[in-house]
Image (cartoon, rainbow, N blue to C red):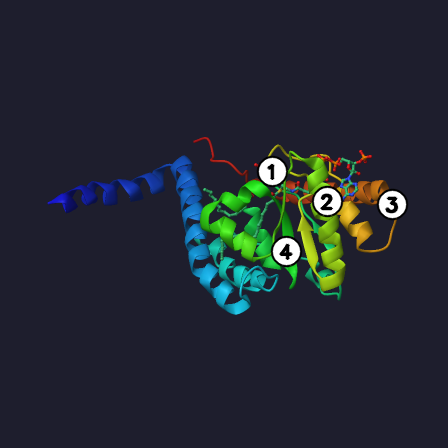
Amino acid sequence: MDAVWILPVLLVLPLLLWTSSTFVFYFKKCFYVAYMMLLAVIAIPICILKSGGRDIENMRVIRFMVRHVKYFLGLRFQVSGWEHLQTDGPYVIISNHQSSLDVLGMMEVLPDRCSTIAKKELLWAGTVGMICWLGGIVFINRKKTSDAKNVMSDAAKTMLADKIRLWVFPEGTRNQNGGLLPFKKGAFHLAIQAQGLTADDVTLLSEQSFGIMRSAFLEISGQSVQSNGPSTH
Ligand SMILES: CCCCCCCC/C=C\CCCCCCCC(=O)SCCNC(=O)CCNC(=O)[C@H](O)C(C)(C)COP(=O)(O)OP(=O)(O)OC[C@H]1O[C@@H](n2cnc3c(N)ncnc32)[C@H](O)[C@@H]1OP(=O)(O)O
Ligand SMILES: CCCCCCCCCCCCCC(=O)OC[C@@H](O)COP(=O)(O)O
């Protein structure tokens, strides 16, 4: 008898999906979170069996498992310059950060032996937090800058010792307001520490990177008429 209630739901759901782009937006958002949580449930035992615990090699498993998610959300990526990442040794990748969907773009191009820096709060995001830990993600406390700097200095040493690459979001937070937030310096300290440059090089490196990313961002934004939020009609 209870099953009768399912009928209106089955009818109303397609109707809402068909008529309301706002509903579609929030539906996709909930689906994304739930599905990533589920994928992580599957990935956790695989990573533990494969590597025995926290290991950068687990990023291969995560990358493989995340790559198809874009199809469910109607997203596609256009990749250019991928060949520049195919060099030996450690390096730092920086990217802008607009939403949690950036993880999909990241997994599209993530090189081997590459992990990322994330806020420590992500560690508590259920199974997603657990898989982030297993993938060797470096967690920082953004409220305690001196701790964060120490963690990142240790990360620079590990990068050199274990030939690891790190992906950093130098804006330090998500930003959907168009353009870029001023860059935090940590990514550039990482880069100089892993390359034998000096602290004097940080400002120039940061400014040059900001300029390049900003012009690429504006160029790409100019090509797209889509926004990140639900459309208003
Ligand atoms: C199969 C399963 C599927 C499901 C699951 C999927 C899972 C997916 C898996 C994986 C994807 C995960 C994706 C996660 C994404 C998360 C992203 C985020 O969380 S973004 C937030 C955190 N990221 C950052 O915050 C950036 C890094 N931050 C920094 O670099 C900052 O610089 C920081 C925190 C170190 C300090 O920040 P300050 O706010 O104090 O600002 P400042 O201006 O940068 O620094 C102040 C002074 O300290 C110096 N400084 C900074 N770092 C230094 C260092 N390392 N050494 C020495 N000095 C340093 C600077 O030069 C500056 O000094 P002077 O003002 O220039 O004199
Ligand atoms: C109950 C927790 C739900 C977690 C659901 C996760 C599903 C998607 C997995 C992708 C993880 C990406 C996380 C992310 O993008 O974190 C935001 C931070 O970068 C910046 O933080 P903020 O803008 O400063 O809050």
Q: How many marks?
A: 4
Secondary structure of the residue carrying numbered label 3: helix
169 vs 180, nearest the viewer: 169
Q: Residues within 10 Å of mark 4 (few under 14, many from 20)?
A: many
Q: CA distance from mark 4 to mark 1?
A: 18 Å
- Mark in the foreground, 2 or 4: 2
The first of marks 2 and 1 along the sequence is 2
Determine if the C-beta at disc 4 is less than 8 A from ligand 1: yes
Mark 4 or mark 3: whose residue is earlier in sequence: 4
How far across and down, in percent of the image, does residue 32 sit?
A: 44, 47
Quadrant where ligand 1 appears: top right
Which amino acid lies under the numbered mark 1 shown in the image of this protein?
A: Arg
Estimate how packed mark 3 is, as few (under 14), some (14 to 19) or many (20 or more) residues with alpha carbons within 10 Å: few
Q: Which residue is mark 4?
A: 115
Report the residue at 42% width, 44% height from top. 28
Query: At 16% across and 46% down in the image, what residue appears?
Result: 3
Distance from Cα at disc 4 to Cα at disc 3? 24 Å
Mark number displayed over residue 150: 2
Camera-near label (3 vs 1) is 3
Label 1 beta carbon within 8 A of ligand 2: yes
Residue 201, label in figure: 3
Q: Residue furthest bottom?
A: 50
Q: Are there few (<14), some (14-19), or many (20+) residues within 10 Å of tag 1?
A: some
Q: CA distance from mark 3 to mark 1?
A: 26 Å
Q: CA distance from mark 3 to mark 2?
A: 19 Å
The reply to whether the C-beta atoms of the residues labelled 3 and 2 are less than 8 Å apart is: no
Quadrant containing the N terminus is: top left
* Residue 143 horizontal side relative to residue 202, left or right: left
Query: At 44% across and 46% down in the image, what residue appears?
Result: 33
